[in-house]
Amino acid sequence: MTLENITNHINANAAAITENLAHESIEVHKYLMQKFSRTNAAEDLLFQFLYRSFYRLDNAGLTAEFKTAYFNIFEEERANQHPNIKAILQKLRNFKNKKGQENVQFSFATKLANTINNSYPIYDSEVARVFGYSRPLDKDFDKKVDKYLLQFQHIREAYDKILAENLLKPTIELFNNRFQGHSLPEMKRLDFIFWSAGKLLKKEVATRKEPQQLDLASA
């Protein structure tokens, strides 16, 4: 799907996309960012709990050891305004999931990087759906991560172009009207908009796949 097709689709569905976002999500994100700026992420259990809940870290089948390492990396990377996503994943790869499997938690690595520097977009299944991307199936760690990074770089370039050329003006105006005084940076607004667009696309696909029921009353 071309960037023009993507932006046209989002602008055509701007009302549904913005209405699909909850005020609570905006406020929780703002609180997390404020909390992160003045706390030690490796030690602050309240921050960790809110972060895990907001980004559904506890729903990914990850071990306590993984989560401890993850929040330790927050502190290690805090002063680095250019987090190296592949290096973060290298640090986490030895922590297998609850099934004993090695897995690449690319989305959570981008969420960590985004918290440190919001010019890094968030990559998740909803955003990937909007761009027509699928999860790399390579078993080799480096090959899989490199394919993820190519997708991530394309998304980052697309977001930069959208902001530079104001390609989502109608949608962003609706977003600003719905969440007045939100004070979110431009990139974070796109994170929310693309996540919501992907969520709605998922619902649309699921609806199309539902078997049609027979109207027995009129049969």
Image (cartoon, rainbow, N blue to C red):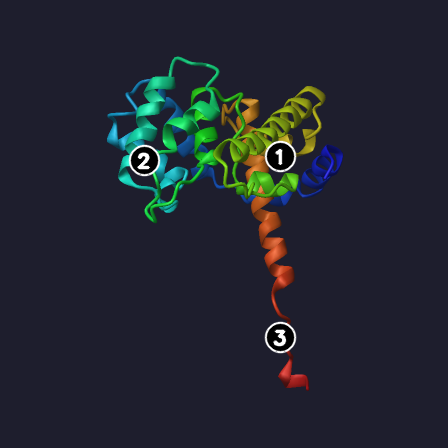
Task: Please state which of the two labelled residues, at mark 1 or mark 3, is closer to the viewer.
Answer: 3
**Helix, strand or loop status at disc 1:** helix
The numbered mark at residue 108 is: none
Find the distance from the CA under tag 1 to the CA under tag 3.
37 Å
Find the distance from the CA under tag 2 to the CA under tag 3.
45 Å
Q: Which residue is mark 1?
A: 174
Residue type highlighted by circle 2: Phe
The numbered mark at residue 213 is: 3
Q: Earlier in the sequence, mark 2 or mark 3?
A: 2
Residue type highlighted by circle 1: Leu
Q: Say if mark 1 contacts mark 3, CB within 8 Å.
A: no
Q: Is residue 52 above or below residue 42?
A: below
Crowdedness of circle 3 by 10 Å Cα count: few (<14), some, many (20+)? few
Give the side of residue 212 with respect to residue 199, left or right: right
Crowdedness of circle 2 by 10 Å Cα count: few (<14), some, many (20+)? some
Q: Which residue is mark 2?
A: 66
Q: Say if mark 2 contacts mark 3, CB within 8 Å.
A: no
State which quarter of the image contains the C terminus: bottom right
Residue type highlighted by circle 3: Gln
Task: Specify the quadrant of the image occupied by residue 143.
Answer: top right
Location of residue 96 in the rendering, given as x and y in whole percent from the top left corner: 35, 40
Q: Earlier in the sequence, mark 2 or mark 1?
A: 2
Location of residue 115 in the rendering, given as x and y in whole percent from the top left corner: 43, 25
Give the side of residue 83 with respect to residue 8, left or right: left
Crowdedness of circle 1 by 10 Å Cα count: few (<14), some, many (20+)? some
For image coordinates 50% across by 37% down, the residue present is: 140
Give the side of residue 95 with respect to residue 43, left or right: right
Location of residue 147 in the rendering, given as x and y in whole percent from the top left corner: 58, 33
**Helix, strand or loop status at disc 2:** helix
Q: Is residue 80 above or below residue 211?
A: above
Extreme residue in the front direction:
140
